[in-house]
Image (tube, rainbow, N blue to C red):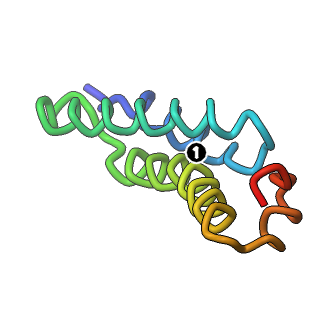
Amino acid sequence: MEKSKRMAATSFAFGLAFWIPLLNFVFGALAIYLGIKALLKIKQEPDKYAGKFFAITGIILGALPIALYLITLVMCLIGYGEVCKATGLTFLA
């Protein structure tokens, strides 16, 4: 029987969409959720599920835009006005 990589591959695909503005939060959250779920299934039933690399990569790519937005927000709040202007968060400056 062939091992299923479907959920891990879907997490990876959503993770690759991290560059799409505004939708990257949704795709990032889906990539993280599906990646974690795939890793849990791989751990519970290793004979049935595979794709650990895809799941981990999907989680990392999904977390990337969220982490970058949080870093940008913190930089704006502590006084980096140029960052606020460059990202459209001028109301925080």
User: Residue at the spot x=57%, y=55% of the render?
Assistant: 70
User: Residue at the spot x=35%, y=29% of the render?
Assistant: 4
Could you say which is closer to the camera, residue 87 or residue 60?
87
From the viewer's perspective, is 23 left or right of 68? right
* Quarter occupied by the C terminus: bottom right
User: Residue at the spot x=42%, y=30% of the render?
Assistant: 34
Which residue is situated farthest in the left direction here? 44
User: Residue at the spot x=32%, y=37% of the render?
Assistant: 36
Q: At which x and y percent is residue 59?
A: 44, 47
The quarter of the picture where residue 80 lies is bottom right
Q: Which residue is mark 1?
A: 15
From the viewer's perspective, is 48 left or right of 20? left
Secondary structure beneath dot 1 equals helix
Name the amino acid type tagged 1. Answer: Gly
From the viewer's perspective, is 72 left or right of 64? right
Count of numbered tags: 1
* Quarter occupied by the N terminus: top left
From the viewer's perspective, is 16 left or right of 7? right
Q: At which x and y percent is residue 82?
A: 83, 73
Please rate how many residues cluster around mark 1, counting C-alpha atoms within 10 Å: few if below 14, some from 14 to 19, many from 20: many
Q: At which x and y percent is residue 26?
A: 62, 30
Could you say which is closer to the camera, residue 14 or residue 72?
72
Could you say which is closer to the camera, residue 19 or residue 43?
19
Work out whether 63 lies above or below 13: below
Q: At which x and y percent is residue 60?
A: 47, 55
Work out whether 39 lies above or below 91: above
Could you say which is closer to the camera, residue 53 or residue 26?
26
